[in-house]
Amino acid sequence: MLFQLESLDWKLEISSAALSRGIELYFESFHRQPIWLFDREDLEPHDKLSSDVVYGILELTERFSHEKNRPQYGESARWLIMLRVANQTVELGTVQSLCLLSYSAFIGKPTLLADNAKREMY
């Protein structure tokens, strides 16, 4: 059974300014670390980007936001990725979004090894 991605009501409203800021933050702080996912021209024009890539970029860069009630970009990206896998419609953007989410989770939470090293130091 194929799920229709366009018919789902959970799409987040994202302003072009918020997306532009997220892309700039990506290139300033995360580009090529740990892998090179995009060139600038790959992310132009913004309205042609897949939703999973947009949500992945915004999930990674939202840590710089000063908003109190930030949208759940990561949850939306994960949902889209799982639908694409279930529908066998995985594209390059899906894999790129998965990399962005993995990196976001890695830098956003203490890892087991880092936690253990920290304990040994003190």
Image (spheres, rainbow, N blue to C red):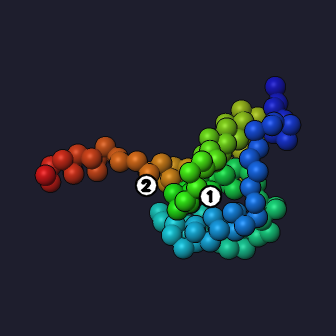
Residue type at the position of mark 1: Ile
Q: As drawn, is 3 to the left or to the right of 96?
A: right
Q: In this orientation, does residue 61 appear?
A: yes
Q: Residue 38 location, x and y as percent?
A: 64, 67
Residue visible at 72% across and 36% down in the picture: 83
Three-letter amino acid code at the position of disc 2: Ile
Q: Is residue 16 above or below residue 120?
A: below
Q: Measure the C-alpha gap from mark 2 to mark 1.
A: 14 Å
Residue lying at 27% horizontally and 47% vertically, measured from the top left: 115
On screen, 80 above or below 68?
above
Please tell me which residue is depicted at 70% across the width and 50% down the height of the picture.
Answer: 52
Mark toward the start of the polypeptide (2 vs 1): 1
Q: Are marks 2 and 1 in contact (CB under 8 Å)?
A: no
Label 2 crowd (10 A; few <14 / some 14-19 / many >=20) = few
Residue 107 numbered mark, or none = 2
Q: Secondary structure at mark 2?
A: helix
Q: Quadrant of residue 8?
A: top right
Residue at image coords 70%, 41%: 80
Q: Give percent across and percent down for residue 107.
A: 43, 54
User: What is the number of the mark on residue 34?
Assistant: none
- Above/below status of 78 relative to 16: above
Q: Residue lying farthest front? A: 68
Q: Is residue 103 left or right of residue 13?
A: left
Viewer-nearest residue: 66 or 43: 66
